[in-house]
Image: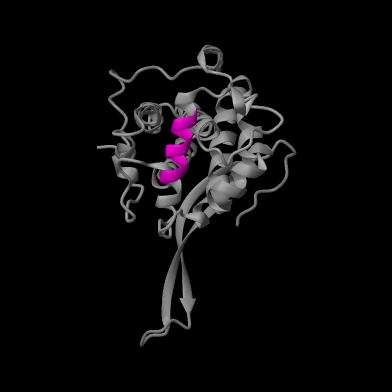
Amino acid sequence: MSNFAFLQSEWSTLFGAASKAEGMANTDARTACFYARRTLELAVDWLYKHDPALRLPYQDHLSALIHGPTFKATAGDAVFTKAKRIKDLGNMAVHSTRIVLRTDAVTATRELFHFCYWLARTYGQRARPAPDLRFDATLIPLPPSAVSAAPAQSIEQLQELETQLKASDEKLSVLLSAKAALDDELQQLRLEVAAAKQANTTQPDTHDYSESETRDYFIDLLLKEAGWQLDVKNFEVPVSGMPNKQGVGSHVGETRLKLGDPLGRCAVAR
């Protein structure tokens, strides 16, 4: 069973790429983040190709596409933020020598789940994911034994794979350069997608997009990009004034300890 099983019937290409990200999250974090970004690229390209409400920005690379005004307006703040996190983690995996942790890969997989849920919920024509569908980290495959584990891919290998995949992708800027030039089949698909989108969005979206988790990880990622190494541990904080007979309780949170700093400053916690 996969967190992305809801994609299989109507979005098989996305399902294949997302399954690779999920399947490697516990074993090859760098490659998992690469495939999470790859899935996002495929999904965003599909959106610009099929949703007539989206207008191609000045460039057709992933960052420009997700920052495009029409995309941000269509996706909303929560989904846009998740797309940006996936993009940033994928870029770090392929273009940075910083260590990519298992928690980074699990985060990229979780954010990808929410993005794909929104896509299927908004644009699905044959099947839509259930409103109560939730990301389940226990569905991520556990690491195999050390003997059978495949070696992690290097940055150089991922960069070569990225180049090969981009060479095979169609260019949105060419495809959509003149709306009048769209072939009859694509124009019909756009009409069908617009009708599905209108029908699907008549009902309010009650999905829990875990926005607080996204905000917390955004801070961690900024610190990591600045060269800080973080160790995350659970802790409980006693809380008074709770609505029970004892008037006390506890709050589960996280401690983030700075392990190293290129400037040699003292350790901090938050």
Magenta stretch: includes residue 191: yes
| Image quadrant in which the N terminus is located | top left
The answer to whether residue 60 shows anywhere in this view is yes
Residue 18 occupies which quadrant of the picture? Answer: top left
Q: 222 left or right of 44?
A: right
Identify the residue at horizontal 45%, vertical 68% (top origin): 251
Residue 129 location (% of width, % of height)? 33, 47
Frontmost residue, 160 versus 62:
62
Where is 45 relative to 218, above or below? above
Where is 149 relative to 67, above or below? above
Magenta span: helix, strand or loop, mainly?
helix
Identify the residue at horizontal 40%, vertical 56% (top origin): 207
Residue 171 location (% of width, % of height)? 58, 19
Frontmost residue, 192 versus 114:
192
Identify the residue at horizontal 57%, vertical 34% (top origin): 87
Q: Residue furthest bottom?
A: 245
Residue 147 location (% of width, % of height)? 28, 18
| Image quadrant in which the C terminus is located | bottom right
Q: Residue furthest left?
A: 1
Residue range in magenta is 187-196
Magenta stretch: includes residue 173: no
Q: 255 left or right of 121?
A: right
